Every structure is written in C-alpha cells, then in structure tokens.
Amino acid sequence: VAPVGLTLQAAMRTYLSDAHVQNIELGCPIAALGSEIPRQAPEIRHQVTCHLKQMLDLIADQSDVGHEQALVAVATMVGTLLLARATDDPTLAAALTEATLKHYNADQPENADV
C-alpha cells in the first residue's frame, strides 16, 4: 500500500500509462465508450454508474482526498485518456498524459517522493 497522499498519483500513473492509452480493448470502458453510454439502455447506464462510483470511492478512500477532489481527479483521468486515445499524434497523446501527471505531481515514481 502506498503512503497516504501518494496513492492518487500511483493510480494516475497506472491509468494514464502508455499501456493503458494504447490498449483500448483492455482499458477503461468509460473512456472507450463514454460518448455512446448516454444512448444505451438504462441497465447499461446503471452499470456504468456503479463502475464510476467504485472508481470515485477508491480514489477518495485510498488517496485520503475528499469526494469533490476525487470527482475532479477521475474526470481529469478519463478525459485525458479519452483525448490521448482520440489523437493520431503520439506526441500530442504523450503531452496530454504528461501534463495531467505533472499537474497532479504524479510525473515521478513514488519512491522518488520518499
């Protein structure tokens, strides 16, 4: 378990990793299908809502951040992933993820913070 305050950064590094950006079929369904979810049946939207709430709870609980900060962090992570995957420019994709990681002080491995 990462020290309190560093888990958010660890989650961001994993979520915005090159492997997650490049492997759409194995990644976050919310980022992959976000624009299509509102057009789905209520049962599917409910499942997405449950998944989103689990993500929010995990970030809030494990990172010792408040619910509002978790909302912003998850929205930022999903939005960054979606945009990084949408572009056909690898440099732009990397810049998007790097900027988000830098903004959240997650651009360095945790052991560098200790």
Image (cartoon, grey):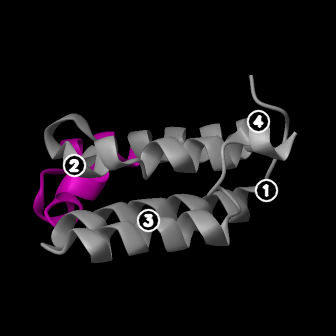
Q: Earlier in the sequence, mark 1 or mark 2?
A: 2
Whole-percent x, y for residue 46 in the image: 31, 45
The alpha-carbon separation of the residues under discs 2 and 4 comes to 26 Å
Q: Secondary structure at mark 4?
A: helix
Q: Residue at x 59, y 62 (%)?
A: 73
Q: Secondary structure at mark 3?
A: helix
Say which amino acid is labelled 4: Asn
Q: Secondary structure at mark 2?
A: helix
The residue tagged 2 is: 22
The residue tagged 4 is: 111
Q: Nearer the viewer, mark 4 or mark 3?
A: 4
The residue tagged 3 is: 97
Q: Quadrant of the C terminus?
A: top right
The residue tagged 1 is: 66
> Does 26 sit above or below residue 24?
above
Q: Nearer the viewer, mark 2 or mark 4?
A: 4
Is residue 9 visible in the rendered image? The answer is: yes
